[in-house]
Amino acid sequence: MTQFKPLTLEEGKYLVKLARKSIEYYLEEGKLLPVPEDAPKRLTQLRYGAFVTLEIIPEERVVPEVRPQLRGCIGYITGVRNLVRDIIELAVYSATEDPRFPPVRRDELSRIIVEISILSKPELIEVKNPREYLDKVKIGEDGLMIEYGLYSGLLLPQVPVEYKWNVEQFLSELCIKAGLPPDMWLDRSVKIYKFKAQIFREKIPNGEVYERNLLEELRKHGKP
């Protein structure tokens, strides 16, 4: 798979701030934010898959030691329109339409951290024996998507890093996400795809935006 890094840090910062602004606008006005006139032209032309993830710090006291909890995550595997339009929509959908959570309230925004993931095109992992997946999937580099009949599921590359999974755990959790038995990845009729993601995140709610380096996070906390 070719290296995937389509955005500059400044472009990533713009999209994260746009996602937050989109949520604020929707909670205030009840409609989607219009595309800003100052939107970088390149971002209005790029079409990539994208996810917006919202995490909430479970205490009023915002400190780095408090681990945030998932509050919403919705995305497109491939781009629908362009990154600006898609991020505006996905931010609102993540805040209001993730079926796992009630809609985000305005009073929660001061405790919510916004993260966006820009995805490369998923590529089928070709194997003769499913156990080859254990060597072909790299923690800290790959996100995964599974397809089996009407079942499908996706996990972003940061997920196994955050939960300290090894490759086999990653594959099992991917199956569970799709509503399949955890060992379904061993079935030869299953299709598994991998993709790269460029991830931009607020350090604290509405704070400085940085680009995550998952391999560095692995080195810091120890590889699974």
Image: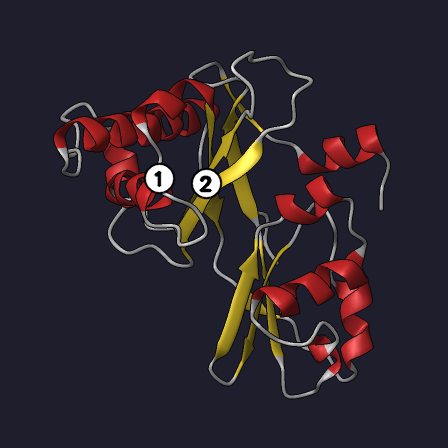
Q: Secondary structure at mark 2?
A: loop
Write down the residue under mark 2: 6
Give how far across and how far down residue 109 sits, in percent.
38, 23
Given residues 133 and 111, the one toward you in this image is 111
Crowding at dot 1, Cα within 10 Å, few <14 / some 14-19 / many 20+, comes out as: many
Residue at image location 68% in from the left, 37% down from the top? 214
Distance from the alpha carbon under mark 1 to that under mark 2? 26 Å
Give how far across and how far down residue 160 sits, in percent.
70, 49
Q: Is residue 117 above or below residue 76?
A: above
- Left or right, 28 with respect to 87, comes to left
Amino acid type of disc 1?
A: Ala
Give how far across and how far down residue 59 sits, in percent.
56, 19
User: N-terminal of the two: label 1 or label 2?
Assistant: 2
Total tally of numbered discs in the picture: 2
Q: Quadrant of residue 128?
A: bottom right
Given residues 140 and 23, the one toward you in this image is 23
Q: Is residue 116 above or below residue 40?
A: below
Write down the residue under mark 1: 95
Give how far across and how far down residue 183 sits, in percent.
75, 76
Residue at image location 34% in from the left, 41% down from the top? 103
Q: Nearer the viewer, mark 1 or mark 2?
A: 1
Task: Give the colour scheme shown.
Answer: secondary structure
Residue at image location 48% in from the left, 14% down from the top? 208
Question: Can residue 40 be seen by looking at this rendering?
Answer: no
